[in-house]
Amino acid sequence: MTLKRQNIAGVSPWEDFVGYSRMVRMGDVLEVAGTTAMKDGKPYAVGDAYEQTRYILETISRLFQEEGIPFENITRTRMFVTDISRWEEIGRAHGEFFRDIKPVATMVEVSSLIDKDLMIEIEATAVLGDK
């Protein structure tokens, strides 16, 4: 069985160069690429893990709104952080968006992200059903 694939482009100049899509829908599953706190080509809220997390989740929320997909359909988040000791700041921001939705979540420490001033990158998965 071949599932219908829908690639949803974002605004990153790197999508074609690296070969990825901002979001990909296959059947009723939507995957959101790793999203960081980049604003106008520069890291946003340098040194503030809470604000970077909020910015990322606002970005993902906006993508869902633009596609007409309920944010509540998110079933999983994956958080890659450069300093796990900042987990409470990150968790507080995540909780502000997902307190009632409660997707499964993973937070792991990584040695670095693509820019030294980025503290967190978030991926998300959603189940859509019939759209």
Image (spheres, rainbow, N blue to C red):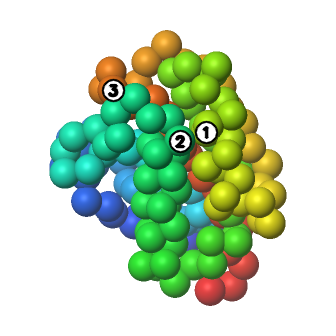
Determine the residue located farthest toward the top in the rendered image: 111
- Residue 66: x and y, percent? 42, 79
Neighbor class of circle 2 (other Cα within 10 Å; few <14, some 14-19, many 20+) is: many
Task: Find disc 1 in the rendering and name its residue.
Answer: 90
> What is the quadrant of residue 8 in the picture?
bottom left
Q: Between residues 52 and 121, which one lies in front from this camera angle?
A: 52
As drawn, the label of residue 50 is 2
Image quarter in which the N terminus is found: bottom right
Question: Residue 25: x, y in percent?
Answer: 54, 65
Disc 2 marks a residue whose amino acid type is Tyr
Residue 2, x across and y down, in percent: 61, 65
Q: Residues within 10 Å of mark 1 (few under 14, many from 20)?
A: many
Q: Secondary structure at mark 3?
A: loop
Q: Is residue 112 placed above or below 23 in the rendered structure?
A: above
Calculate the distance from the C-alpha at mark 3 to the C-alpha at mark 1: 15 Å
Of mark 2 and mark 3, the one earlier in the sequence is: 2
Specify which label sits upstream in the sequence, 3 or 1. 1
Which one is closest to the eye, mark 2 or mark 3?
A: 2
Q: Where does the image place residue 115, in percent across and percent down from the top left?
A: 30, 26
Answer with left or right where residue 10 lies relative to residue 27.
left
- CA–CA distance between discs 2 and 1? 5 Å
Asked if labels 1 and 2 touch by Cβ distance under 8 angstroms, the answer is yes
Residue 30's disc is: none
Residue at (33% x, 21% y) in the render: 116
Question: In 3D space, how far apart are the residues under numbered discs 2 and 3 (Cα atoms)?
Answer: 14 Å
Frontmost residue, 114 versus 46: 46
- Element type at mark 1: helix
- Residue under the image location 44 percent in, 53 percent down: 55
Q: Are marks 2 and 3 in contact (CB under 8 Å)?
A: no
- Identified at 44% across, 35% down, the residue is 48
Q: Is residue 123 visible?
A: yes
Q: Secondary structure at mark 2?
A: helix
